[in-house]
Image (spheres, rainbow, N blue to C red):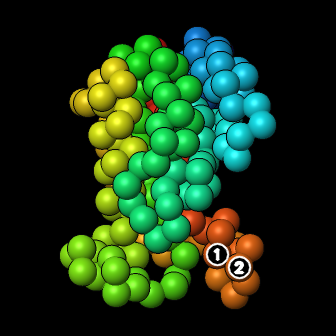
Amino acid sequence: MMLTKRLFTVLSVSLIGILVGCVTQQKYNQLDQAYSQLQQAYQGDEVEIRQLQGELKVTIKDKILFSEGGYRLNAKAEAVLAKMAPTLSGFQNTKVVIRGYTDNVPIGPELRRLGISTNLDLSSRRADNVADYLIRKGVAPALISAQGMGETNPVASNDSTDGRSQNRRIEITLVGPGT
């Protein structure tokens, strides 16, 4: 009897630990709803949306958002981000993490004159500009963070034009309960 009770206690504690580590159904449903809304908004655009465990990641190629080698949002960028703003502005407890990435090509003289000396600087400015725009469109400032990653974490080889193009991107990740 004592062994059975002890085994039951161990199994109960283990099950609770497993359940706490899993994504709640409500959280999953809310992120799934955001996924569906964003998928509908971006049909045909060069935007990739992936639903991960407890996260939703939106990847936008830099050429949609910025002129080549630039960091200021262009008109197309504002249109692309404006589609995302209504979904993101509905969140009150979900963190919006914006990360900018570049390829490994050194910074040119034009950007150096503007005070941008590294790819990390460039990616930081890009991420900050995306965050600022989303805040202006109603996303809660306390929920947004922006970070430049420079040339770290490439998704393709920097040895080809296509690979470098894939590495120049903005990733917007939704993390949290989805509300």
For this view, does 22 lie left or right of residue 177? Answer: right
To which residue does mark 2 refer? Answer: 161
Q: Quadrant of the N terminus?
A: top right
Question: Measured from the top left, where is residue 42 in percent x and y?
Answer: 69, 31
To which residue does mark 1 refer? Answer: 164
For this view, does 76 lie left or right of residue 110? Answer: right
Question: Measured from the top left, where is residue 81 in percent x and y?
Answer: 50, 35
> In terms of depth relative to the viewer, which is nearer, 41 or 49?
41
Residue name at image x 42 percent, y 49 percent: 73
> In terms of depth relative to the viewer, which is nearer, 104 or 107?
107
Is residue 167 in view from this perspective? yes
Q: What amino acid type is highlighted by mark number 2? A: Thr
For this view, does 127 lie left or right of residue 114? Answer: right
> In terms of depth relative to the viewer, which is nearer, 110 or 151?
110
Question: Measured from the top left, where is residue 89 in percent x and y?
Answer: 41, 19
Q: Secondary structure at mark 1?
A: helix
Q: Is residue 86 above or below residue 115?
A: above
> In terms of depth relative to the viewer, which is nearer, 1 or 39?
39
Crowding near pointer 1: few (<14 within 10 Å), some, many (20+)? many
Look at the numbered discs 2 and 1 and tell me whether their residues touch, using CB distance below 8 Å: yes
Q: Quadrant of the C terminus?
A: top left
Q: Is residue 107 above or below residue 30?
A: below
Q: What amino acid type is highlighted by mark number 1? A: Arg
Name the quadrant containing residue 18: top right
Name the quadrant containing residue 10: top right
Is residue 117 in view from this perspective? no
Residue name at image x 36 percent, y 17 percent: 92
Crowding near pointer 2: few (<14 within 10 Å), some, many (20+)? few
Q: How many numbered dots are placed on residues in this image?
A: 2
Question: Measured from the top left, where is residue 52 in percent x and y?
Answer: 66, 39
Q: Secondary structure at mark 2?
A: helix
